[in-house]
Image (cartoon, rainbow, N blue to C red):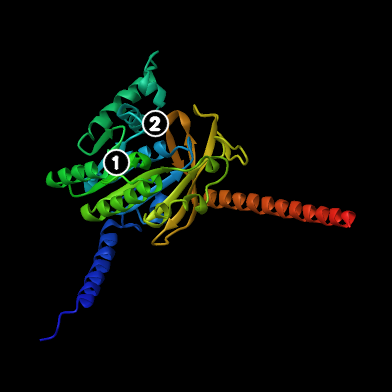
Amino acid sequence: MKKKSYSDKDLREQVLKMKDRGEKLLLKKRKFLGFDTGFTILNNATDGFQDELYLLAGGSSMGKTTFVTQLCWQMCMKNESEDLRIIYLSLDQKAIDITAKFVAQAGELPVDYVLHPFPVDEELDELRIKAISKVSSLKERITVIDEEEFSTRELEDVLIAERKAGVEKLFVIIDPLFKIKPEKEEERFLDTYRRVMLELKKLSGRYGCGILITYGLSSNAELRRPERRDLLEIPEILSIPYVVMSLYCDYMVNFETPFLEWDWSGRDIMVPISELNIIKNKMSFFMGRLFYRYFASLSLYRECVDQENENYSQMIGNIVYHKEKAHRKDRQLLEKQLQKDDKVDV
């Protein structure tokens, strides 16, 4: 009797999975396999959000919470036919603030009016009431948990409860990472981060759910565009996730570029352009920057089209080129001055 080859069995299983993947794409009649994020270009760049670990990094006040809140709302709406359920762990903001953003995004009305509907504006109030009804109708598909901190053990309990309740399609959003505690506390702060990342990766695989986490970068990344090296302090932050992205808008603090558009027809006259840089993508569908208009009054991002993405990327490339050119010139002048000083000393 021929001995069973586990490697052959694994290969056959993977071939069947690849076949199944192709059939699913044909049935869905779309290019990407995972859940629809509500952003067309982001879907094509990442193959949709799947049962994997995703990380969104950025400096303080760059819009990470607003971006993932909008992703949560859009994923719920766009994947209604698949009955996707989303657990939103809001460990930095109260549930009412997150819900207010859902309502603002659902009705495309100012988040300030959602929270403070006085004095009454009849047009906005009609939108507010309809948006509240729309958000309320999805109470079985979105759960917001606001706690000061949460552990991976508590998260596993939530996932177990969801599976026991018969939930098949599940996605988790955690904002922010540093308030998630591992099962066992580590003495060193960086080791705690490493353990949390490993445990979240295991939970994603064990319960077949996608997990998106936000991660705050150091203050250096607030004054310039985040780079890959900004994530290297904790290697697991970069190595473990399936996709790593960074969010940046120099209009907020740096004002070096800045990318601004003018909209005289809306409440946001100045509309800043935010950059979503896909730093790591394990399937390598896309690596690079995507751009979004940010409407502050609505807490809403709108995706730029392909040509706009190309134009803005080229502008950044030109800025980087001329900045490096100026630095090289400064170094050459400094070297010449040092050589002159050496000759004088001799």
Q: Which amino acid type is shown beneath numbered disc 1? A: Met
- Position of 291 compared to 324: left or right? left
- Residue 255 position, x and y percent, is 61, 37
Q: Residue placed at 61% from the left, 49% from the top? A: 315
Residue holding disc 2: 108
Badge 2 crowding class, 10 Å Cα cut-off, few under 14, some 14 to 19, many 20 or more, is: some
- Position of 221 compared to 335: left or right? left
Point out which mark residue 77 bears. Answer: 1
Q: Determine whether 142 is above or below 8 in the image.
A: above
**In the image shown, does 81 or 162 lie closer to the viewer?**
162
The residue sitting at the top extreme is 119
**In the image shown, does 47 or 217 lie closer to the viewer?**
217
Point out which mark residue 85 bears. Answer: none
- Position of 166 compared to 108: left or right? left
Q: Residue placed at 32% from the left, 41% from the top? A: 180
The residue sitting at the left extreme is 1
**In the image shown, does 312 or 6 lie closer to the viewer?**
6
Q: Which amino acid type is shown beneath numbered disc 2? A: Glu
